[in-house]
Image (cartoon, grey):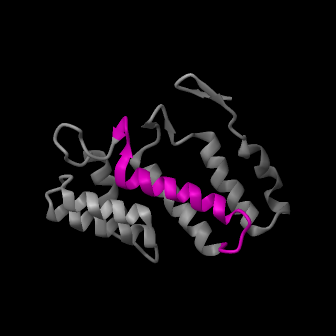
Amino acid sequence: METAEGTFFPIIDYEFYEKFSPYVTADRKDYIEIMSVESQQVPAKDAALVISWDEVLKRAQNQEKFLTTHKDSVKAAEVKKLYQQYVVYTLYGLNNTPLFSYETNTIDPEAKKSYLAAVKNPRHSEYLKMLSGYLDLLAKNNYVLTDEVKQYRDKVSEQ
């Protein structure tokens, strides 16, 4: 059981299911791996990220890989929903861990560092290509949250 802001909710211990991985299909094995990471360390609590920006990027890329590799999996919709959540974390942060300072509208220095390192080799990742485009726009705007940046991230998060 977990608790956040006075609400209790169950967290499935997917780590328990890892011992069954050799006996399930490849998509189920990968799903268990993704969900095990989520259950070992929840990404957010009380409207704040409790994992690093590097970890946000890593998890999103693993989810994207699942969706690319296992398009027809019965678990694809669930992983897609999780992936979309991570895209929002990437573009916005959370209320108590915003990507941009509420006072100065500048990007969080740790996030910027993580993001710039991640896009050096985007490979075949649409997620990293999206992030690279976001960073190009941010660089053009001195890493400040402008109306142009807001419009870009709103458009991307809707897709």
Q: Position of residue 159 (x, y in %)?
A: 44, 68
* Residue 82 quadrant: bottom right
Q: Residue at x 41, y 61 (%)?
A: 157
Q: Position of residue 97 (x, y in %)?
A: 36, 39
Q: Is residue 115 left or right of residue 28?
A: left
Residue 157 in view in this figure: yes
107 part of magenta stretch: no
* Residue 126 quadrant: bottom left
Q: Which residues are magenta?
A: 70-97
Q: Residue at x 65, y 58 (%)?
A: 78
Q: Residue lying farthest right?
A: 23
Q: Position of residue 23 (x, y in %)?
A: 85, 62
Q: Residue at x 38, y 65 (%)?
A: 156
Depth order, front residue of 84/67 = 84
Residue 157 against residue 126 in the figure, above or below: above
Q: Position of residue 24 (x, y in %)?
A: 82, 63
Q: Residue at x 70, y 74 (%)?
A: 72
Q: Residue lying farthest top?
A: 6
Q: Is residue 110 left or right of residue 65?
A: left
Q: Residue lying farthest bottom?
A: 124
Q: Is residue 65 left or right of residue 102?
A: right
* Residue 1 quadrant: top right
Residue 115 against residue 96 in the figure, above or below: below
Residue 119 in view in this figure: no
